[in-house]
Image (spheres, rainbow, N blue to C red):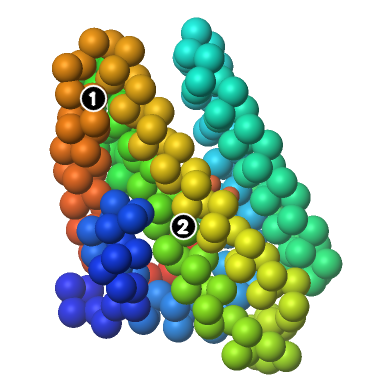
Amino acid sequence: MPGRRRTLCREGRLAVLHLQGSTSTEWLETALAAMDRVLVDHAHCEHKAAVTALAFVSKYPDDPRLVTSLGALARDEAGHFARLADLCIGRGLSLGHPDKDPYVDALLAAVRRTSPLHNRVDRLLCCAIIEGRSCERMKLLAAALPALRGRDAAGVVDDAICALYDDLWREEATHHLLFVELAERSLARAGSPDAVGETRQRLNELAAHEGALVARLPVRAAIH
Ligand SMILES: [Fe+2]
Ligand SMILES: [Fe+2]
């Protein structure tokens, strides 16, 4: 039963990332058993993250903070993609075309279309949640992979992979916080008398939705 999956994360870490419900041991075991598949999926995730950040810049070019911060984030994500792509190609893996991502599709289904502001806030907060969940899972990989160095049953675990996940989870945590800040700023610029409180309430609602998805969706050898 998904709801009974054993979980791995301490509550404090979840709270920092505004996540409701931690990743299961089943996900970590599945990922570690098929690291090559995880790496290819992860490369596509980083590519999509860069494209999404630039799409925000195109849609909201009149918000200087959004333009500069998401421009920089897109550069980060493109760098992550290049690192993953190098790793995959070095291991003889082909990136191919990305699979559909049922997690992201189901998460974005909760985005409100009741007003342009609601839509903007929800899309920023969904990105915050995706960054938060990615951070949590990359940190789990960073902690588990060093003990598996040299193993090659489902892809060699080497120093490059260990270093990759040890670097990336920290960056994704800052991305999470940036998207929350941009949602707050969007509400404040639109005149909300309590942008912080309004953001927190909507973030909690979306995080509850995401936590239910994580418990319900099949576990995959993928970041989400
Ligand atoms: Fe990234
Ligand atoms: Fe990120």
Crowd rating for badge 1 (residues with CA inside 10 Å; few <14, some 14–19, many 20+): some
Percent coordinates x, y for residue 6 in the rendering: 27, 82
Seen from the viewer's position, the closer of residues 218 and 126 is 126
Q: Which mark is residue 61?
A: none
Q: In this figure, which residue is indicated by the disc labeled 1?
A: 195
Q: Is mark 1 within 8 Å of ligand 2?
A: no
Q: Is mark 2 within 8 Å of ligand 2?
A: yes
Percent coordinates x, y for residue 189 in the rendering: 33, 13
Name the kind of residue labelled 2 in the image: Ser
Residue 105 visible? The answer is: no
Q: Is residue 152 left or right of residue 180?
A: right
User: Where is 112 relative to 174, above or below?
Assistant: above
Q: Quadrant where the C terminus lies?
A: bottom left
Residue 60 visible? The answer is: yes
Q: Quadrant of residue 206?
A: top left
User: Which residue shows up at 21% across the image and 38% down it?
Assistant: 200
Seen from the viewer's position, the closer of residues 182 and 97 is 182
Q: Which mark is residue 134?
A: 2
Q: Is residue 124 left or right of residue 97?
A: left
Percent coordinates x, y for residue 34 in the rendering: 57, 78
User: Which residue shows up at 24% across the image and 31% down it?
Assistant: 196
Q: Secondary structure at mark 1?
A: helix
Crowd rating for badge 2 (residues with CA inside 10 Å; few <14, some 14–19, many 20+): many
